[in-house]
Structure formats: structure tokens, C-alpha cells
Amino acid sequence: MLDVAVIIVDDDKDFLGEVRQGLALENLSVVCASSPLTALDIIEQNLAIRVLVTDLSMPGLDGLELIRRVGELRQAPQILPIVLTGNGSLDSCIAALRMGAVDFLQKPLEIASLAAAIRRALDLSLQKWRAATLLDDPLALLRLLDRLRMDRKRVLPSVAGGDAAWEMLLDLAMAQAAGRQVSVSALCAGAGTSTTTALRRLEALEQEGLVERRPDPEDRRRVWLQLTHKGGASVRQAGRRFAETLRAMV
């Protein structure tokens, strides 16, 4: 039991027996508990458990309360819940999801569907553990930052101003995504350098076809900035590279 990563909780002992046998045929070892209190004792003694599969409707302590208590009992390593129910309401589904449930399966269920959900949860748990480990490793973080710098250079190899110009482009992209207009003066003011230097970097972005200026139709003295199609594509490409780099490291 000490190295089993999955616990299944249901007050129907016959159901537990069928599920245990079915999952064994799927090469998944599980520990079963017919009451939430027993489950809490098992989880407290077994740090290997990473996935909790629980029924919602149980006497005494229901599945939602069990998920809440497990979250309080074990925050690291985190246990990911999968919810089973025979007559679950939409409110119960939403409540479970808000409490961190990663899957919601309706009874009667097929063993293959449960096995697939458990494997997805185990994979996600491993990713979360690797990400947490990365945050605690200063050398790994430095390698990540170095790779991200190289990714940015591959996306915008010829833009003058380097990382500073990239930050201006990213500031504009974030503002545009939020539905906010940005003026030339506002973008330069937020660049953290002199206006002259910021304007040079802005001109470099314009020359690369990443940013364009548009006069305000109501006030011709004011000029708005926006990403071009190429500029938006460059930001998305950098975002994808970041995601790929991070996935490779975790």
C-alpha cells in the first residue's frame, strides 16, 4: 500500500471490489476505502498517493467535504481529485471543479474510462511535481531564463534594442489583448528609459513591420499604436516557444 498512488473512496463495497479488479486488468494498482474517514487515515500515512477518486454521495462525510479535507491535509505533494457520481447536480460539478477536481465521471461507468481519467491525473500530478521542483532549483531556473532569452532572439533576431524592444512589444500586446488603446507617449513612458531611446526602439519595431501608428480620428494630435498581423504572430510564436521550453524542462 505504501507505494500505491491512487485511492478510491465509495461506500458501496461491491463497487469497490469490481473497480479494483477491473483496474488491475488495466495495470493500475489502487487502494480502496469504503468511508471518507478511513480514506483520510490512509492518505495521512501514505505520501505516495497523488490521485483521489471519490463518490460524491456518501453518508456522514460527502465527497466534496472529503476533497476539502484532503486539500488541507496534503498541500504538497498535491492530491488531484476525480469525482464519481450517480446523480450529481450541476452545482456539485461546479463545486468539485472549483475545489480542484480534474475529472468528473458519471455512474455507471466503464473501467476503461476510469483508467484513462486516472492516467491523465497521474500525468498531470507528475507535471505539477516537476514544476514545483523546478521552482526550488536555482540552477534550473537560470537555464530556463537563458533558454527564454534565446527563444526571444530567434523570434526577433534583427530588432534593435534587444530585450527592451521586446518588452515594449509585449506591453503593447497585453494592452491590446485587454482592449486598451496605447499612445506613443504612453508606451515610451513605460519603457523605463529616455524618450529618445524609447522612440528609437519603437521605430525599429515599426521598420520590422511589427507595430504601426494610427491617428486618433477624434483628436489628430494623438496617435495610437497597435500590433500588425506580423507583430501579433511574433508574440504568439514567442509564447509557443516559451510553453515548449517549459514543457521540456518539467
Image (spheres, grey):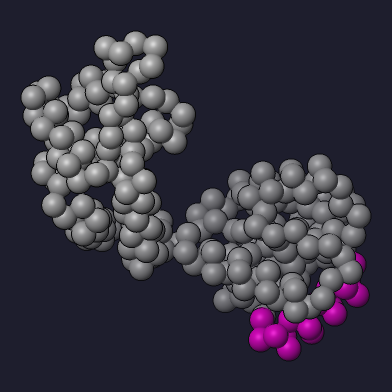
Q: Is residue 160 visible?
A: yes
**Which quadrant of the figure contains the C terminus?**
bottom left
Give the magenta part as a residue range: 12-28
Task: Indicate whether 185 appears above or below 53.
Answer: above
Instruction: Decide which of 143, 163 is in the foreground and name it.
Output: 163
Residue 137 lies in the magenta-colored region: no
Instruction: Decide which of 14, 208 is in the foreground and name it.
Output: 208
Please indicate whether residue 172 sits to the left or right of residue 197 in the image: right
Task: Indicate whether 28 appears above or below 206.
Answer: below
| Residue 98 image-quadrant placement | top right
Please indicate whether residue 222 sits to the left or right of residue 79 in the image: left
Please indicate whether residue 126 sits to the left or right of residue 31 in the image: left
Residue 17 lies in the magenta-colored region: yes
Task: Give the residue drawn at x 16%, y 55%.
Answer: 157
Residue 222: horizontal and vertical position, in percent? 29, 15
Task: Indicate whether 188 appears above or below 84.
Answer: above
| Residue 3 image-quadrant placement | bottom right
Q: Is residue 164 visible?
A: no
Residue 169: horizontal and vertical position, in percent? 27, 39
Instruction: Decide which of 33, 95 is in the foreground and name it.
Output: 95
Task: Give the residue drawn at x 11%, y 41%.
Answer: 161
Residue 66: horizontal and vertical position, in percent? 73, 51
The secondary structure that most of the magenta stretch takes on is helix
Task: Give the residue drawn at x 74%, y 43%.
Answer: 95
**Which quadrant of the figure contains the N terminus?**
bottom right
Task: Give the residue drawn at x 24%, y 56%.
Answer: 155
